[in-house]
């Protein structure tokens, strides 16, 4: 579903070129989950942005569903993000003027892939039944993050990208949200890539890679 092949990324800085990613290759199949760990500044978010088509590599391929999106124009990458990629962040990025149900429907409507039956199922699975008319400020942090997950999954994306998805939650709530996220990923059979610094978040996922000095290594123990 997702493949990065010999990807390089360098940024210009006042001190000169900064190589962030150096010859990165990874693959992720449909229904699989992968944790990407690394210290702050190690390039985790850059890799996530490349996978989402939010940025382009200097060299290499970013292949999603058989197509090299690194060659796409921005308009085509934006369309692909709407239709095939779900994004979940540490900050919830809910629209404060929209109710829970309208926030949940937003991504699917933008992708023209709204499914009323699937939306109702998501609300029930997310434990948000009865809260449909509430606004984000009327929800707890855990409820807001569950809503953000539901919004990302509403169009049934092929790939779900999550950047520190439980970073703003207490430990108990984080565990609940993570368990729910993995359950919904198995149900939808989308591929999941999670960027995290937490071994507790990474442990339940199928595989874990660590990014250090712009290169990847498998994590075999905690």
Image (cartoon, helix red, strand yellow):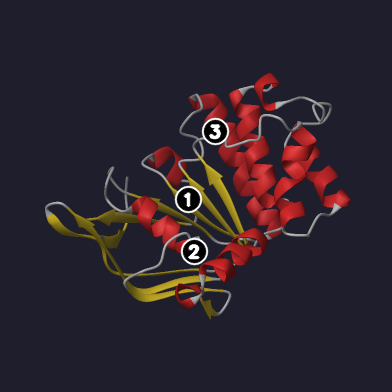
Label 3 and label 2: CA atoms lie apart by 29 Å
Q: Nearer the viewer, residue 11 or 32?
A: 11
Mark toward the viewer: 1 or 2: 2
Residue carrying label 3: 175
Q: Which mark is residue 86?
A: none
Point 64% across, 22% down: residue:
140
Above or below, 83 relative to 194? below
Specify the quadrant of the image occupied by residue 159.
Answer: bottom right
- Can residue 76 be seen here? yes
Residue that extends furthest to the left in the rendered view of this protein:
15
- Dot 1: what SS? strand
Disc 3 vs disc 1: which is toward the camera?
Answer: 1
Q: Are marks 3 and 2 in contact (CB under 8 Å)?
A: no
Residue 92: percent from the left, percent from the top? 57, 35
On the picture, is 215 further left or further right than 160? left
Q: Residues within 10 Å of mark 1 (few under 14, many from 20)?
A: many
Question: Residue 49's x, y, as percent?
Answer: 44, 57
User: Which dot marks residue 53?
Assistant: 2
Dot 3, crowdedness within 10 Å: few (<14), some or many (≥20)? some
Q: Residue at x 58, y 75 (%)?
A: 65
Marks 3/1 in contact by CB < 8 Å: the verdict is no
For disc 1, the marked residue is: 194
Residue drawn at the location 49% of the way across and 37% of the way down: 90
Tell me which residue sits at (67%, 63%) in the image. Answer: 83
């Amino acid at each position: 579903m997702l493949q990065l092949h010999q990807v390089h990324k360098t940024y210009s800085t006042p001190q000169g070129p900064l190589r962030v990613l150096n010859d990165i290759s990874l693959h992720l199949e449909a229904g699989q989950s992968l944790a990407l760990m690394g210290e702050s500044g190690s390039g985790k978010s850059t890799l996530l942005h490349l996978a989402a088509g939010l940025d382009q590599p200097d060299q290499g391929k970013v292949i999603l569903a058989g197509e090299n999106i690194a060659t796409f124009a921005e308009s085509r990458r934006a369309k692909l993000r709407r239709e095939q990629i779900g994004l979940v962040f540490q900050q919830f990025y809910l629209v404060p003027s929209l109710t829970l149900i309208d926030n949940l429907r937003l991504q699917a409507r933008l992708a023209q892939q709204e499914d009323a039956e699937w939306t109702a199922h998501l609300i029930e699975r997310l434990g948000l039944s009865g809260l449909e008319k509430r606004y984000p400020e009327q929800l707890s942090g855990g409820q807001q993050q569950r809503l953000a997950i539901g919004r990302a999954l509403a169009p049934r994306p092929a790939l779900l990208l999550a950047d520190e998805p439980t970073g703003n939650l207490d430990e108990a709530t984080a565990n609940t949200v993570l368990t729910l996220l993995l359950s919904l990923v198995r149900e939808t059979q989308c591929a999941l890539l999670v960027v995290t610094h937490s071994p507790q978040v990474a442990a339940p996922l199928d595989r874990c890679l660590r990014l250090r000095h712009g290169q990847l290594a498998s994590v075999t123990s905690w």
